[in-house]
Image: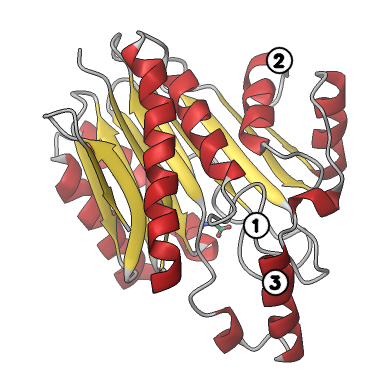
Amino acid sequence: MRPALVVHGGAWDIPGVAVDACRAGCRRALEAGHRVLDAGGAAMDAVEAAIVVLEEDPVFDAGFGSHLNLRGRVQLDAILMEGETLNAGAVAAVERVRNPIRLARRVLEASRHVLLVGEGAEEFAREQGMPLCRPEELVTESQRAAWQVCREAGHDSAAHFAREHGTVGAVAIDVAGRIAAGTSTGGTCCKYPGRVGDSPLIGCGCYADNEAGGAASTGWGEAIMKIVMAKTAIDWLREGHEPQEVADRAIRLLRERVEGTGGLILVDRQGRIGASFSTPHMAHGYRNANGEFVVFP
Ligand code: GLY
């Protein structure tokens, strides 16, 4: 079958100055993922490749350049899920891992567990021979400055506005019909240390099942968790609903049932794409039937 990939860089109120960078980041992620898929590679590899690009890009809230927590540190969460086996690997609250999606994959493939957090996750990374970075290496000057502004405003919610959601994600189906989904995030701006949102949780941050499709969420994690958004959407795909209808319905449920904001990207088992969001923008992109990348801020 024809492979497909959809990526996102978060549903948020993207300021004008960041629009071009978000577009360029999504495009680079699509290029990286499609390089894998077009060579006959696996959906898991494509999702990982796309998310590594997004984690490395400081315009997004994942990996390098993530929001700082109340203590002024970056704490990262990520998940990767394989639709063939329903296996998943996830990490949460790691501070020394530059590409948590890579560590999530190691958890999936080389551990007996699904989710490792904090020091244990970092110890596992060391055991797996993955390089650890210093926590300061994940902090950009602009995020440090934004954190200072929040701190001086007493962490008033207005200071966080428009900077809460820049999580990244990707969903792919490969030539063999295998589906994978992944998500990576620095979480919310000035979050409480140890706070974990939807992103690294199966069914919340992402879900993938070859029998139905794959989905990745972004937005306000405390609300997304309550409706288990990615799995809910996949259940609707399984019932035979169209991907765009499913994405719209999930975002409506998020808004109406739990007053949440956010976005969702989807690929169904035929490679059809859906994307929906309730924020002013969602940085996201995919390749259309003509082989052109379609990238929206
Ligand atoms: N959706 C990302 C988070 O709430 O952490």
Disc 3 versus disc 2: distance between alpha carbons? 33 Å
Which element type, helix, strand or loop, lies under badge 2?
Answer: helix
Residue sitting at x 45%, y 46%:
25
Q: Is 67 on the left-hand or right-hand side of 212?
A: right
In the rendering, at what x and y percent does residue 24 appear?
Answer: 40, 48
Q: Name the amino acid, label 2.
A: Ala
Q: Nearer the viewer, mark 2 or mark 1?
A: 1
Q: Quadrant of residue 121?
A: top right
Foreground of the two, 157 or 143? 143
Residue sitting at x 71%, y 15%:
110
Tally the numbered discs: 3
Which residue position is annotated with label 2?
Answer: 110
Residue sitting at x 26%, y 49%:
275
Q: In which quarter of the image is the N terminus?
A: top left
Instruction: Please tell me whether residue 260 is drawn above or below residue 53 in the rendered image.
Output: below
In the rendering, at what x and y percent does residue 241 appear?
Answer: 14, 40
Which element type, helix, strand or loop, lies under badge 3?
Answer: loop
Q: In which quarter of the image is the C terminus?
A: bottom left
Q: Name the amino acid, label 1.
A: Ser
Which residue position is annotated with label 3?
Answer: 190
Q: Counting other residues with Cα less than 10 Å from the Cα at mark 3, is it few (<14), some (14-19), or many (20 or more)?
A: many
Q: Is 241 on the left-hand or right-hand side of 185?
A: left
Quadrant in which ligand 1 is drawn: bottom right
Foreground of the two, 59 or 249? 59
Instruction: Please tell me whether residue 129 is drawn above or below residue 163 in the rendered image.
Output: above
Foreground of the two, 246 or 14? 14
Q: Name the amino acid, label 3.
A: Cys
Q: Counting other residues with Cα less than 10 Å from the Cα at mark 1, is it few (<14), some (14-19), or many (20 or more)?
A: many
Residue 272 seen in the figure: yes
In the rendering, at what x and y percent does residue 107 appear?
Answer: 69, 24
Which residue position is annotated with label 1?
Answer: 66
Which element type, helix, strand or loop, lies under badge 1?
Answer: loop
